[in-house]
């Protein structure tokens, strides 16, 4: 993921931010898996990571259902931090790493293709 930090007050940046916000929220699974490719994280850390890199806030109510679903599918596994039974750290399984990379590659290819079609 590349970092995106729009300047407040710049109209063009605000318009761009609106589309970035929609893209990330609609495709949050891709951005969650992308974050977890970098390192294992708890849900709160994923939310912070996406916000810091993309300036888009994903709520707990949108992130945790994705994490639970990916865990059920065997793409993620979760383990509690030592001494803290409230916080789980999520990691991609081997199968999950392959799926995440494939999905990210397809997502990037799709964005590139759409960009090409729009700019014709």
Image (cartoon, grey):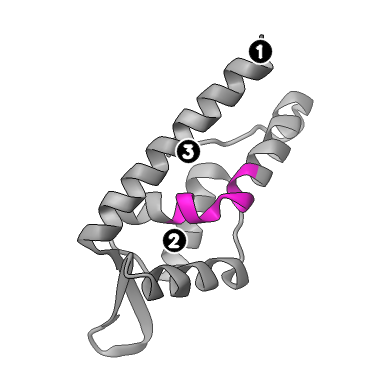
Residue 119, label in figure: 1
State the CA–CA distance, disc 3 to disc 2. 19 Å
Left or right: where 114 falls relative to 75? right
Question: Which segment did they paint magenta?
Answer: 23-32
Asked if residue 58 shows in the view, the reply is: yes
Which of the two discs, 1 and 2, labels the residue nearer the N terminus? Answer: 2
- For label 2, the residue is 46
Locate residue 69, reporting x and y percent.
46, 71
Which quadrant is the C terminus positioned in?
Answer: top right
- For label 3, the residue is 107
Is 103 situated above or below 74?
above
Residue 103, label in figure: none
Which quadrant is the N terminus positioned in?
Answer: top left
Pick whichever, 6 or 100, lies toward us: 100
Which of the two discs, 3 and 1, labels the residue nearer the N terminus? Answer: 3
Which of the two discs, 3 and 2, labels the residue nearer the N terminus? Answer: 2
Left or right: where 104 falls relative to 20? left
Left or right: where 63 falls relative to 36? right
What secondary structure characterizes most of the magenta part?
Answer: helix
| Secondary structure under the numbered disc 2 in the rendered image | helix
Pick whichever, 89 or 7, lies toward us: 89
Crowding near the residue tagged with mark 3, few <14, some 14–19, many ≥20 C-alpha atoms within 10 Å: some
Quadrant for residue 72, please give it. Answer: bottom left
């Amino acid at each position: 993921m590349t970092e995106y930090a729009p300047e407040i007050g710049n109209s063009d940046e605000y318009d761009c931010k609106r589309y970035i916000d929609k893209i990330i929220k609609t495709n949050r699974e891709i951005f969650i898996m992308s974050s977890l490719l970098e390192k294992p994280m708890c849900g709160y850390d994923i939310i912070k990571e996406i916000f810091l890199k993309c300036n888009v806030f994903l709520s707990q109510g949108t992130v945790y259902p994705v994490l639970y679903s990916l865990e059920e599918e065997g793409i993620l596994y979760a383990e509690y931090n030592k001494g803290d039974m409230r916080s789980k750290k999520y990691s991609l399984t081997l199968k999950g790493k392959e799926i995440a990379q494939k999905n990210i590659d397809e997502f990037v290819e799709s964005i590139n293709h759409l960009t090409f079609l729009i700019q014709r």
